[in-house]
Image (cartoon, helix red, strand yellow):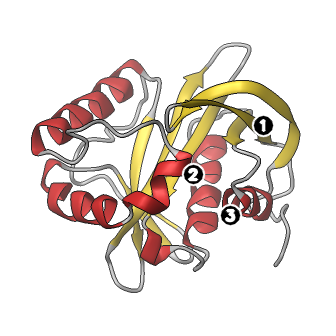
Amino acid sequence: MFALPFFRRDLPALKGNLVTLRVPFTNDFREWSTLRGESRAFLEPWEPRWTPDELDRTAWRLRISRYREDYAQGTAIAFFIFEKSSGKLAGGITLGNIRHGVSQSGHVGYWIGERFGGRGLMTDAVKVVARFAFDTLRLHRIEAACIPDNIRSIRVLEKAGFRREGLLRSYLRINGIWQDHYLYARIADDPLDAGTKD
């Protein structure tokens, strides 16, 4: 279990240069469902297959419950990404599969609404989560998996200082199909300014 009360409303948000991250609240439903709904065609090729009730309020409540349960078990922390300049919800990022002991590692997964793509928001969010993982949770290693065709996601990870370590064959079932993924990772000892500049 984590020492920090992440589901209290008075918890300070994590701040980057372009984004603010905070845990999702129940009353985020409308903004979340609108953004996900309008971005569906943009997101579906890179995500597990959407269920028929994906954007329903009941499914949302179950999602929030799962976020809280994962946190309580110490296995994951989900954040929503808000664009600093507008205050609007732009996407989500999760630090999951958190392991302690000899591993001290976690896995980053993320999504962004189509209208917010290409602004550097996700790169900033990944850097913020990496800093949190290393400095606050004291993890040693964070990983991310990426479909080889997902050029945007590859650029995000490389700009955030992640290095490609290999190919995971038939790793995750994405949009109904088992897909190969590149494995990227960053470790706590990597320089803070690691990553490509452009």
1, above or below 59, in the image: above
In whole angstroms, how far apart are the C-alphas of marks 1 and 2? 18 Å
72, above or below 77, in the image: above
Label 3 secondary element:
helix
Label 2 secondary element:
helix
Amino acid carrying mark 3 in the image: Arg
Quadrant in which the C terminus appears: bottom right
Q: Residue at x 37, y 29 (%)?
A: 71
32, above or below 79, in the image: below
Residue assigned mark 2: 129
Q: Earlier in the sequence, mark 1 or mark 3?
A: 3
Q: Residue at x 38, y 58 (%)?
A: 40
Quadrant in which the N terminus appears: top left
Q: Quadrant of residue 105?
A: top right
Amino acid carrying mark 2 in the image: Val
- Using the rendered image of the protein, determine whether residue 13 is visible from the camera's viewpoint: no
Task: Give the image location of residue 155, x and y in percent.
Answer: 75, 63
Task: Give the image location of residue 172, x and y in percent.
Answer: 61, 28
**Image disc number at residue 183:** 1
Task: Give the image location of residue 170, x and y in percent.
Answer: 71, 24
Judge by depth and name the residue closer to the eye, 45 or 146.
45
**Image disc number at residue 79:** none
Q: Nearer the viewer, mark 1 or mark 2?
A: 1
Residue assigned mark 3: 152
In whole angstroms, how far apart are the C-alphas of marks 1 and 3? 15 Å
Number of residue marks: 3
In whole angstroms, how far apart are the C-alphas of marks 2 and 3? 18 Å
Left/right of residue 132 with respect to residue 19 in the rendered view: right
